[in-house]
Image (spheres, helix red, strand yellow):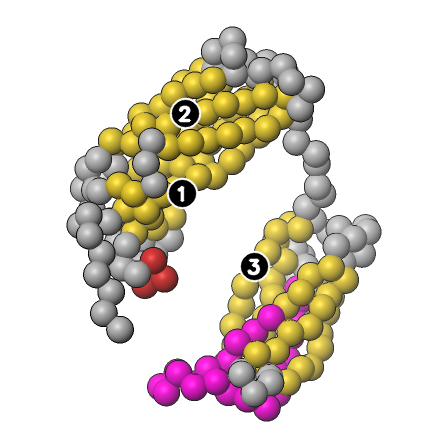
Amino acid sequence: PGQQMRLRALAMDAMTMRALGDQAITYEIEDSKGNKVFKRAGKTDAYGVSSVDFQLADEVLMGDYKIIATMGTTKSEKSVVVKKYVLPKFKLEVKTDKKFYSPKEKVKGTIQADYFFGKPVTGDVVVKGSTFDVSMREFQQVKVKTDAKGSAEFEITLPDYFVGQPLEKGNAYVQFEVTVTDSAEHAESVTKTASVCSQPLLICAV
């Protein structure tokens, strides 16, 4: 609430992958109850790019907002979450022993949780390991506890098979969602990702 949302679209021909310049495009936004709260016409530049701004009011409906961009008969949709911002009560730092892993490999990680006034957080930790194929898929969950210094360690064994992603140059990635809950039942979460590749050497030919 109260923030400005910038909508940006890139239009390309599906066959030639050339930018579609000087094309009319319409932006629409629906709130969490399906009410249309924004509609504006735009036009792509020579590079097929168009953008508009939408100002959220200070008092709005919370939940999933649907953004719709329409060009001719082509329609593209995206959802974003609108919710009140709450200052975190403590900070989390997650580190893994490596940045790159192979399938079946064991990942070792460390967690440090501290209140902003310096005192360590003593509480329960849940680590969820997920991979991406057509959507995020959780493959393992580990539960540990932080010690008197606010530290914890975890180990997760990676699956046998991963789906490579074009934007990652054919590599896959693994995601670790870490949630720490303190004695007052307040929870904070942080996400850490690492690359997964089947070979130790990656060759790219251009």
Residue occupying image coordinates x 54% and y 82%: 48
Element type at mark 1: strand
Q: CA separation, marks 3 and 1?
A: 22 Å
Residue occupying image coordinates x 69% and y 61%: 5
In this rendering, the label closer to the viewer, 2 or 3: 2
Regarding residue 56, the answer to whether it shows in the image is yes
Q: Position of residue 31 (x, y in %)?
A: 68, 59
Mark 2: few/some/many CA within 10 Å (<14, 14-19, 20+): some
Total tally of numbered discs in the picture: 3
Q: Which residue is mark 1?
A: 193
Between discs 3 and 1, the one toward the N terminus = 3
The answer to whether 182 appears left or right of 174 in the picture is right
The answer to whether 11 appears left or right of 163 in the picture is right
**Do labels 3 and 1 touch, CB within 8 Å?**
no
Q: Position of residue 162 (x, y in %)?
A: 24, 49
Mark 3: few/some/many CA within 10 Å (<14, 14-19, 20+): some
Q: Position of residue 86 (x, y in %)?
A: 70, 36
Q: Residue 206's image quarter? A: bottom left
The answer to whether 13 appears left or right of 201 in the picture is right
- Say above or below: 206 vs 187: below
The amino acid sitting under disc 1 is Thr
Residue occupying image coordinates x 71% and y 77%: 40
The amino acid sitting under disc 3 is Ser
Q: Which mark is residue 79?
A: 3
In this rendering, the label closer to the viewer, 3 or 1: 1
Q: Residue 79's image quarter? A: bottom right
Q: CA separation, marks 2 and 3?
A: 33 Å
Q: Position of residue 112 (x, y in %)?
A: 50, 23
* Residue 96 located within the stretch drawn in magenta: no
Q: Which residue is mark 2?
A: 110
Element type at mark 2: strand
